[in-house]
Amino acid sequence: MNMPRSLLEEVMTVSLRRGILYPSAEIYGGLAGFYDFGPIGTRIRNNLIHLWKTQFVEARDYVYEISGNTILPSQVFKASGHLDHFTDPSAECSKGHVTRIDQLIEELLKIPAEGKSNDELANLVMEHKIRCPVCGEPLRGVKSFGLMFGTNVGGDRRQAFLRPETAQNIFLGFKRVQTAMRAKLPFGVAQIGRSYRNEISPRQSIVRVREFNQMEIEYFIDPRSLNECPFFDMVSNVSINLVTREEQNKAAEKSSTDYSSTQLTVKEAFEKQFVPNQWMASILGDEMIFFQQLGIPAEIIRFRHMRPEETPHYSGGNFDLEIQFSFGWKEVIGNAYRRDHDLQSHMKGSQKELSIEVEGEKITPHVVEPSFGIDRILYAILEHTYRPKDKSRGWSWFQFPPNLAPYHAVILPLLNRPELEEVAKEIYEKSRKMGLAVLYDDRGRIGRRYARADEIGIPKAVTIDPQTLDDDTATIRNRDSASQTRHSLKKIPSFLHPSKQK
Ligand code: ATP
């Protein structure tokens, strides 16, 4: 009997077939937890990054973007605490399979396990006789597994590490950016780039991988002005779903991780002190505005106030943006009020001054950090915009919002006739000159070509047919409704612009 395929399997089948993403070094069998983005995935990813930059960097004259290296000397991570503390709990079976045990416990027992001590986890393993998910053998003991990837640099083989987050470059370059840009508090430093973690159990496509991409901002704030966020008024009426610690405690009493959330505005979240300061409240609202553009419904987005055991001791409050996937709720953005921990740690580690003078007073800025995972957000978009084939359409497709779609339109000459191809090429070139991303496809039956375009979520298909030669019109097929309307050739490129599409 054929088992029904999971949504993840369906999404991955189309993604592999259509060059969205595929395992790295696939022809050699690859390595778990590494994926490449193909031509279509790269375009979607670039669009996502563009949307992010437009909202969070370009629209704010106090946010500066940097681009730092991924290999950094070991002292950086000694000072940041990653070398000593950046671990996940693991358990091994007699056959040598190593598993991330807190997550396995959460899945099997449906109780929160992240942040529990190794002893507590080991007790749960024994009590519930939890076995290896790969081979079914009993699991033995629980150990901390370091997530840092190490390497050696140069002839003297100096020890270095691949960064596990983009944030550290921002703290290291803080003083340089501040002086070069003559930046006054508050200001933000943003970075988009790769991060590396030797995850114990990579899985769920690009949701948990060992090399991934982040978009992070460190907002440096005068600790006396944490309740004066410059964009608060812009977001204060935005509605957010918040899972409070109280709600999580209530659920824990019932041994459940099924949390309900409270819907409130950013202003209410701040005024009722659900969040530590106005900056944090504003960031959550800003993220909701960003997510409105991604095709992910607001009802399946929530902010969870992390429990104390999931939060580092220096944190003034962490609020993860979680999305409901087919396999459960998962963090896609970590929001953390880090106080002055990072700058203080690097001052201690490097013996360099990272405080700044504000009106004659020495200040170590406090930091509020939103940390977006590009890959997880991309997978969320794939899952939530995926439409399986049905009676009306014999193929599956993606309903990407127009500004995320890999192309704005595909241009299709109906038949292989030079006079049709000539007009199609003209429209194609004219659209490109107008800055539109268009694809030209003249191969195969027209139905197949519509299917191929739908499968990579192209919102519009322009078909040049024999009638075009008579009356200078062509059809535009709408991906979502599959309906076709005729338009004059002159007007077609402007109709393809994303601002003209839903
Ligand atoms: P998790 O608890 O799921 O491992 P985390 O709390 O360690 O995540 P953060 O350190 O807060 O994650 O990282 C910020 C963001 O970076 C996450 O919200 C996620 O989107 C992304 N991210 C972190 N680890 C990975 C990974 N292994 N693969 C893909 N994305 C990741």
Image: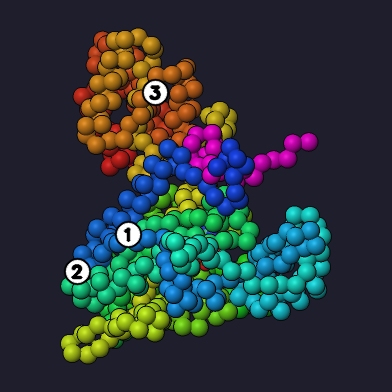
Calculate the distance from the C-alpha at mark 3 to the C-alpha at mark 2.
47 Å
Residue 502 lies in the magenta stretch:
no
Which residue is at a point 50% across and 55% down the rendered structure image?
211
Residue 156 seen from this side: yes
Residue hosting label 3: 441
Residue toward you, 8 or 484:
8
Q: SS at mark 3?
A: loop
Mark 3 residue type: Asp
Query: What residue is pinned by disc 2?
Result: 181
Disc 2 versus disc 1: distance between alpha carbons? 15 Å
- The amino acid marked with disc number 1 is Ser
2 and 1 marks in contact (CB < 8 Å): no
x%, y% of residue 103?
65, 65
Q: Secondary structure at mark 2?
A: loop
The quarter holding residue 446 reads top left
Disc 1 designates what residue? 67
